[in-house]
Amino acid sequence: MPVYLHHIETAVPETAYPQTVAAEILKQAIATDDRKTERLIQRLYSHSGIETRHSVLGGFEHDGPGSQFHNLAEGTFRSPSTEERNLIYTEAARRMAPELAARVIDGCPGVSRGEITHLITVSCTGFFQPGPDFAIVQALGLSDSVERYHLGFMGCYAAFPALRMAQAFCLAQPDAVVLVVCLEFCSLHLQWSRETDDLLAGSVFADGISGAIVRAQPPAHGGLQLDAFVSALAPAGEQDMAWTIGNEGFRMRLSSYVPELIQNGITEALAPVLARTMLQKDEIDHWAVHPGGRAILDRVERGLGLPAESLTASREVLRNFGNMSSATILFVLKAVQEQARAGERIVALAFGPGLTIESAVLTRV
């Protein structure tokens, strides 16, 4: 029995930072009289493929969330504790998650709030309980019997396990209507650090939220059929992409070797999902690749021998929003879905700690 992704919605915080401004803030914070670090920051930010990123930190120069990173009285920068950062996450999640969930349901033809049976939330950038799933149920007046699940601290690939879980619910319960919400506020974990890994992570990560409706009933207008999912590991990258929790936010290890590791493993990782759907690579009409960074997209394109225009949607999402961790792939899928015609095949790919490579085949209906 086929299962379908009916509708996708996306949202970002109101505050937008041009990449040039973000680079200047970082230089002011950590690179005083250090020309070598300033040049590295300039190179990382100017070659990132990003023009704009959004953040729940509403500015560093006035009272508000961003002021947690700035000692306004002394005019110096400070590094908030993990608790302080998580409090900002909690406030933003309680506000934005219900707003986005309402748009997903209300924008999906033939689905009402009372029909939602399952809710899956995804996030690796904060924790609180009762969580965003509870906030969504309460704010939208969903049934108390909605089954709620949370996938936490998985990283950029986590939307794939969420969609796979939603598919499983629908296969087991054909009348299920599953709401998936991915919310990530990566900017909260900005580090005033001169370590290359911290500088690299700080140059690409951003804030965003996305959601989708999954059900077994065919969509009335468009949508994507979920054909197959496959997980793969490139264990050589275990130490090159990793999360940990520190006293001053979550620390991301993102080495410059990640794009090369992905290029070396991408063909082998993709083969099982193509075999499961009995497709050849040249039968794929569209590619939806998680834009972890410009170098990652370049290496995927090179590793799979794709035409330059194949990753246009991924590059546009990267340029306009940056890497929003698990929320990002739904931004890309939404753009690809709008371009694709009925019957066309889509391969989606995402990467995360491990090094984990998730792949999926979908068909535009």
Image (cartoon, rainbow, N blue to C red):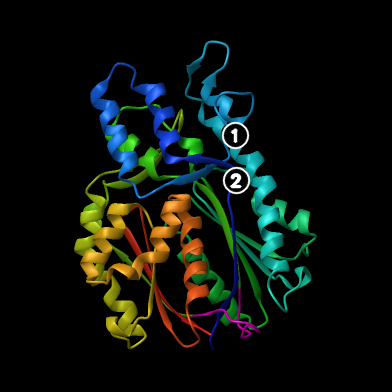
Q: Examine the rendered structure and indicate whether residue 117 appears above or below residue 351.
A: below
Q: Examine the rendered structure and indicate whether residue 123 appears above or below residue 85.
A: below
Q: Badge 1 is on which residue?
A: 58
Q: Secondary structure at mark 2?
A: loop
Task: Compare residues 72 and 240 and report the one nearer the observer.
Answer: 72
Look at the image and tell me whether residue 107 can be seen. yes
Q: Which mark is residue 13?
A: 2
Q: Examine the rendered structure and indicate whether residue 237 appears above or below residue 226.
A: above
Callout 2, which amino acid? Answer: Pro
Look at the image and tell me whether residue 182 can be seen. no
Quadrant in the picture for the N terminus: bottom right
Residue 64 place in picture, x, y as percent: 64, 28
Query: In which quarter of the view is residue 247 placed?
Result: top left
- Marks 2/1: CA–CA distance: 9 Å
In the image, is 43 to the left or to the right of 5? left
Q: Secondary structure at mark 1?
A: loop
Residue depicted at 56% across the width and 82% down the height: 171
Residue 147 place in picture, x, y as percent: 67, 65
Residue depicted at 29% across the width and 30% down the height: 195
Callout 1, which amino acid? Answer: Gly
Mark nearer the N terminus (2 vs 1): 2
Do residues under tags 2 and 1 come within 8 Å of each other at their CB atoms? yes
Q: Please state the extent of the stretch shown in magenta in the rendering.
A: 214-225
Residue depicted at 31% across the width and 59% down the height: 297
In the image, is 154 to the left or to the right of 177? left
